[in-house]
Image (cartoon, rainbow, N blue to C red):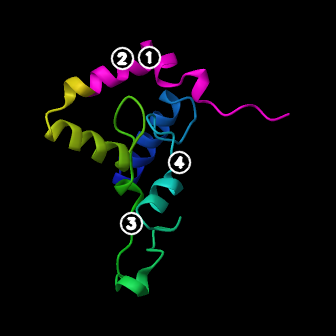
Amino acid sequence: MSRVDKEFDRYFSAMDRAGGQDRCYLCRRAPAEVKAFFGFDEDGHPTKAQEFGIEDVVLEEADIMSYRGIRPICAVCQLNLDAIFMLDEEAQLKAVLNEMRDEREKLWPDSDRPPQQD
């Protein structure tokens, strides 16, 4: 199987695992949104290439999304988690996730919400 065939197989297998959703499992960003976050257009070219002198830089699809795991993960979320792990804050991450799951009302009380407009 060629390298291209392997990449297609990996991508379509990930799409099957993710129910056909080509989005990051954590933040729900689509590949184009991840590229925009890093300053690239949908084709992978820098949006401000001339301004920063980086005309020769092109972002490849493999640089923004990983389809190798259980669910697709974007580079933004991977970098965020890398930073959390490097700071040795895994326990705090688990505590935040537990708080989000178990104490949602504490984090988002009704009194903080703007009144609904009719």
Going 42% across and 57% down the picture, which residue do you hit? 61
Instruction: Measuring from the top left, give residue 42's x and y in whole percent.
Output: 53, 64
Q: Amino acid at mark 3?
A: Leu
Q: Amino acid at mark 2?
A: Asn
Residue 48, compared with residue 4, is above or below; it is below
Quadrant showing the C terminus: top right
Q: Is residue 77 in sight in this rendering?
A: yes
Q: Which residue is mark 4?
A: 30
Q: Which mark is residue 98?
A: 2
Q: Residues within 10 Å of mark 3 (few under 14, many from 20)?
A: some
Q: Is residue 55 in sight in this rendering?
A: no
Q: Earlier in the sequence, mark 2 or mark 3?
A: 3
Count the labels in the image: 4
Measured in 3D between alpha carbons, the distance from the residue under mark 4 to the one under mark 2, in whole angstroms, is: 26 Å
Q: Which residues are magenta?
A: 93-118
Measured in 3D between alpha carbons, the distance from the residue under mark 2 to the one under mark 3, in whole angstroms, is: 36 Å
Which quadrant of the structure image shows residue 87?
top left
Q: Earlier in the sequence, mark 4 or mark 3?
A: 4
Going 19% across and 31% down the picture, which residue do you hit? 89
Q: Earlier in the sequence, mark 4 or mark 2?
A: 4
Q: Which residue is mark 3?
A: 59
Question: Looking at the magenta stretch, what is its main secondary structure?
Answer: helix
